[in-house]
Image (spheres, helix red, strand yellow):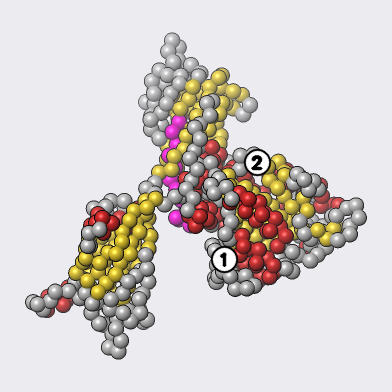
Amino acid sequence: MADCVSKVELSVSCSDLLDKDVGSKSDPLCVLLQKNGGDKWVELGRTERLNNTSSPSFSQRLRIDYHFEAVQNLKFGIYDIDNSSVDLGDDDYLGGVELTLGQIVSSKTISRPLQLKKGKPAGKGTITITAEEIKDNRAIVLELEAKNLDKKDTFGKSDPFLEFFKKGDDGKWQLVHRTEVVKNNLSPTWRKFTVPLQTFCSSDLDRPLKVDCSDHDSDGSHDLIGSFTTKASDLQKAAHGSLVVFDCIHPEKQKKKKSYKNSGVVSVKSCELVAQYTFLDYVMGGCQINFTVGIDFTGSNGDPRSPNSLHYMSPDGLNQYLSALWSVGQVVQDYDTDKLFPAFGFGAKLPPDYQAAHHEFALNFNPTNPYCQGIQGIVEAYRQVLPQLRLSGPTNFSPIITHVASIAATAAQTNTASQYYVLLILTDGEITDFDQTRDAIVRASRLPLSIIIIGVGPADFKAMELLDGDDGVLRSTVGEAVARDIVQFVPFRQFKDAPMATLAQSVLAEVPNQVVSYFKMRGLEPPKPKAAPKA
């Protein structure tokens, strides 16, 4: 998922730092550490040292790679530097703060009191951190056509396609885009395509580009028809109504024939630069990611009192359902300001009468207010209701998908990019209402909603894999295709012995692209961030 990695720049300022120097103010510096596996803190960078100030604003920014799908624990430490050694062990500690990168980017600007150690404030000292994504968010949109290309095939016309290369810093050509093949046509028009400007020409409009036009052969031995060199600033001239036409030159033919003019011409039908927004543009603009959980309490899970049941609580108070919930929930909760998560169960009979099975009941038994406080709140509600439920059936997914979709539909009517919904379904995978679920997903694919399904237990999950249309397009019962891919399925057993964080990394990696693809489909720009509140 390399394309989801963004670089974020953090700027740091402090106020009311402790004065450790006799007769003058401290000489502060900020160091940034990130927690790696276990309890190890690794230094990522530090700011410059400022002399004689208790309210520094550091100009040296701190850069860090941002991954939505992981909890990135950071520690900011402020030190009073009185010597030239790099080691901070001999410098006075003025206080620090621990935050996750998710907390910082979802707030955009965050202020916290400095602490000397947990629970011990560093006087009145505070730290303020502001995040900014480093990027060029432009993309180039091109449409090209060709005329009179050389015929390369003995029996038919050529099957031409284009390949674009940029010149790397090492002088080598790097492939940046390949068009589709147009069959049997010497004057083809290729489909319009969009490439991020950073990819296309390293954001340098004058970087040399090379374009090869070749004849596609199914055995992979494509024949070059001809090439030309250009740069993005030349292609752009087409945007201003100029004719931008290139001779396709085959070097061998050019050598052999004095009268050789070209092997056809390629012209730019249209070229424009457009802004492409990223996931962080939306989050930092104030878009809330709303997290809802649905838990499968159907009979196929086994009686929770039996050690063979998927709902059986081991002596440490965990089971696969709770482990999966913790792993994913810990990441997502940083992006939801109120930390109130609606949680539902399905497939169980409820007290006091245990009559019909319910396919969407509030996990806290409070239908008018199904919200739990944080992931911890969901875990507590689950532990409380589990002994009171009678596991039943059938296993219907569509009611809970339809329920969350109706909330997302209301949010979509505001026509702003302010809300997005993620539904996490934890299930043993035995689904009864497959067709209704398919229909519900196809309808939901036009809404600000992503669905993550985690399969718990040993089942073969064939039906779940069909819902995650990765290998083919999911269609409704009447043949309507999903507007975009919104379902991500993983079996928990693949991660059973891996660190907890790896499950979240796997299921959440696609969410940033799904968020962007929805708002792009709707043509919605990120909200304008509000002014940072005064600390």
Q: Of the numbered discs in the image, which one, if any, rests on residue 172?
A: none
Residue 92 location (% of width, % of height): 48, 22
- Of badges 2 and 1, the one in the foreground is 1
| Stretch of the chain drawn in magenta | 1-12
Q: Which residue is mark 1?
A: 482
**Neighbours of disc 2 within 10 Å: few (<14), some (14-19), many (20+):** some
Q: How many marks?
A: 2
Q: Residue at x 58, y 61 (%)?
A: 445
Residue 320 in sight from this viewpoint: no
- Name the residue rendered at 25%, 58% in the picture: 241
Q: Position of residue 461 (x, y in %)?
A: 67, 68
Magenta run includes residue 2? yes
Disc 2 marks which residue? 339
Q: Observer-nearest residue: 411 or 507?
A: 411
Q: Residue furthest right?
A: 353
Q: Quadrant of the C terminus?
A: top right
| Secondary structure state at the residue bearing disc 1 | loop
Q: Nearer the viewer, residue 342 or 317?
A: 342
Three-letter amino acid code of the residue under disc 2: Lys
